[in-house]
Image (tube, rainbow, N blue to C red):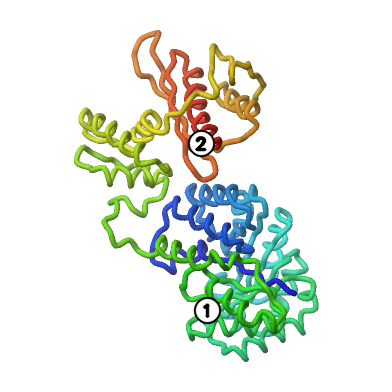
Amino acid sequence: MKTLKFIDMTLRQAGPSFGKVLTFKEKLEIARSLDRLKADTIELAPISGSKADQLANRTIAQMVQTCISAAVDIAEANVAETWESVRTAKKPAINIIAPVSPVQMEYICHKKPAAMLTLIEDQVKAARYLSECVEFTAEDATRAEREFLFQAVDTAILAGATKITVCDTAGVMLPDEFGTFVRDLMANIPALKYNELYVQISDSLGMALACAAAAVREGASGVKCTAVADGFPTMEGLAHFVQVKGAELDIATGIRVTELHRTVGQLAKILQPEEEETSRFAGLGLEEMANVCLDANDDLAEVNRVVAQLGYDLTESDKSKVYEEFKRVAAEKQFVGTKELDAIVASAAMQVPSIYKIQSYVLEKDGEELCDVGIGDGPIDAAFAAIEKIVGHHYELDDFQIQTVTEGRDAMGSAFVKLRSAGRVYSGTGISTDIIGASIRAYLNALNKIVYEEAV
């Protein structure tokens, strides 16, 4: 029995389709949910080059077991940068998306057919050099000149693509027409017999699911879908199709169907526009959040919303502690920026026992002295590298700040460290007359929170 594969595009389509800018935390929650459902592939949107996009991709890649495919618009030619954002995934992939209809080739890439074939070959080869799994997506394939489409797909396969997706971007075909379209592809591109063929169909006529069914009957390996309806076949609709017609067509699905309805309901709540009062800073990316300022007039809910946007996932008790400390600081200062808020969270929330301790530059755990050697760009970077070697794990350094808190030759130095693990943020602070010592203490403060939580 053949397993019908689902490539979920929820995270790729979320921005333009749902009219809502997802927060960092929401992206991670969607990825976790799709991973639990056992979607065959989770497809991510093309990165814009911002630090926030790359960080979101890297975090998602590290936290799920499912194949993670990062989309690349061929006109952007940022294959290496995109690969860097997902290469740590257990199953990383790159999806080269190229327009193949005459109008879109001219409008998007400003290229004629011959030049377009060369671009497809170059970009797919660049992706294949980096990744074992490369997908080529032919945008607007149903309106392409048929011979050119055959050439484009064949070129991509010869360049190293192992998955091919053809799109009815405009959603203009009826089910029997789309079935014939897929049959022609299989007949005219012999190499497709040794590769996986997927279909991506717009639901503008309300027939996307029927067209997908026709494609499957003609030999398509899988269908691109979304968890929540947004103009494409939904995962629920496809799963129901397999339940009803699976035995007749000799197909099955690896999706956890029993959990599907509940999970889709949860995702729908995440993706729908907020009706309740939202933060005045909603929609800001990680870079813009650096300029956010709160004041004494901001209430508990607003402070907690900003804390959540910074990536923290606090308990109700810790939220109260953070707000109490925020009020104390806000009473002394006109504005409280996000860096001060980071420090407040580090000092007031998630306080745990010190599993790792530092005594005169000697690291201890349960009374045992631990040592190793690290090399880095300066003594602090080298110290962090040595700690990582001792604990046997690399954590992403999301932020690092140092400043003096007293004056004079024996001035005290304060350090702040923010680490990211499995999609969550942990911060720590340290104070010492030696800024290197303060930095190490801050790192261990954050590390202890991670280790404590992982052991619970």
Q: Nearer the viewer, residue 405 or 233?
A: 233
Looking at the rendered structure, the kind of residue marked 1 is Ser
Give the residue number, with chain letter if any, for mark 2. 453
Q: Is residue 307 above or below residue 272?
A: above
Residue 375 image offset from top left, x and y in percent = 65, 25
Left/right of residue 358 with respect to residue 266 in the rendered view: right
Amino acid residing under circle 2: Glu
152 horizontally vs 317: left or right: right
Q: Residues within 10 Å of mark 2 (few under 14, many from 20)?
A: few
At horizontal 40% and vertical 41% (from top left) the residue drawn is 314
Q: Residue at x 73, y 66 (%)?
A: 162
Q: Is residue 249 above or below residue 382?
A: below
Residue 80 visible in this rendered orientation of the protein: yes
Check residue 363 in the rendering and tell me which mark sits there, or answer none.
none
Crowd band around label 1 with a 10 angstrom C-alpha radius: few (<14), some (14–19), many (20+):
many
Of residue 48 and residue 87, the one placed in the foreground of this image is 87
The quarter holding residue 198 reads bottom right
Q: Position of residue 13 (x, y in %)?
A: 49, 66
What residue is rendered at 20% in x and 37% in y?
A: 296
Task: Say which residue appears at 73% left-offset and 77% top-offset.
Answer: 151
Of tags 2 and 1, which is closer to the observer?
Answer: 2
Instruction: Provide residue 316's location: percent of width, then percent of height.
Output: 35, 41
Which element is circle 1 on?
loop
- Give the CA distance from mark 2 to mark 1: 44 Å
How many numbered badges does the structure rendering display?
Answer: 2
Q: Secondary structure at mark 2?
A: helix
Residue on which disc 1 sits: 202
Instruction: Tell me if I can see residue 147 in this picture.
Output: no
